[in-house]
Amino acid sequence: MGQKKFLDLATDSTYDAGLYVIVKKDGMPEAKRLTLATVVSDEAETRETADNAIIDGVGLEADATFAPIETSEYLKTADFEDASLDSTVKNALVLLDEAIAVVDEAVAGFSDLTNEIVKISSTSQRRLNSEPVTIIDCPEDGVIHVVDCVAFLDYSGGALNCGEGATLDLRYSGGGDIGSWTNGFLTATADARQKMKFEDNHALVVGDDVELYTSGDDSGGVSTSDIYLYIVYQILSA
């Protein structure tokens, strides 16, 4: 059989590390042969190093599979099973995307929240019944929606006495109650913090300011303590 030119040789479609390829470069007196295993060895080592870096960086198992994270909130085995999804990185992102969407929907109406700290002096506290203190001014045709409010009694001496069972109340200036703090908070003789208890199903009142008041005054009181309200609210259009 005579020698054939390289391009006339039959094509072998099956990889065999023992096959030879012809190599030659300038300055080499004659062509040489290398096995395919030798040709690809450097590339294979580099590729394996890169693959391992990706596996470690993504947090995959040694075989490149994704293991559910049982200590997580949304990527436990049960989460994948409930969604009828295999535990892959792509499906993990799907579960996280769905969880984010739920949160986005829940807070969609609260992107314009305002946080304020309002100080009510001991002098103002003693006459909150006759002179309620305005906490939030309402714009014309607006509606104040109180989302949360915590009161802090910065005790420094004495105690309020606004009458038996009196409570500290947050209301609309027209009289609609929003929520209140207990008599125990109002008459505390040490630093105290209490979250406001909302009035059940209270109505949102158009155009009314929000104010703080009590059911009775303590005109002869000796309290020197200030109260701070940490209030979160939004202004809605009527």
Image (tube, rainbow, N blue to C red):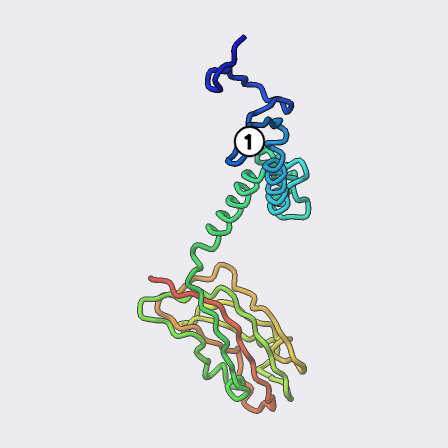
In the rendered view, would you say 201 is above or below 17? below
Q: Is residue 221 left or right of residue 204?
A: right
Residue 8 coordinates in the image, percent (x, y): 47, 15
Pick out the residue farthest to the left.
Answer: 140
In the rendered view, would you say 76 is above or below 2? below
Pick out the residue farthest to the top.
Answer: 1
In the rendered view, would you say 111 is above or below 164? above
For the point 61% across and 43% down, the residue is 75
Give 6 or 167, whichever is nearer the viewer: 6
Quarter of image, res 181: bottom right
Residue carrying label 1? 29
For the point 51% across and 51% down, the residue is 103
Q: Is residue 201 left or right of residue 157?
A: left
Residue 3 coordinates in the image, percent (x, y): 52, 13
Quarter of image, res 32: top right
Q: Dividing the image into 4 quarters, which one contains the N terminus?
A: top right
- SS state under label 1: loop
Q: Is residue 85 left or right of residue 130?
A: right
Give 189 or 26, whichever is nearer the viewer: 26
In the rendered view, would you say 170 is above or below 50? below
> Would you call the spot at circle 1 few (<14 residues within 10 Å), some (14-19), or many (20 or more)?
few
Q: Dividing the image into 4 quarters, which one contains the C terminus?
A: bottom left
For the point 59% across and 31% down, the residue is 39
Q: Amino acid at mark 1?
A: Pro
Residue 55 coordinates in the image, percent (x, y): 62, 42
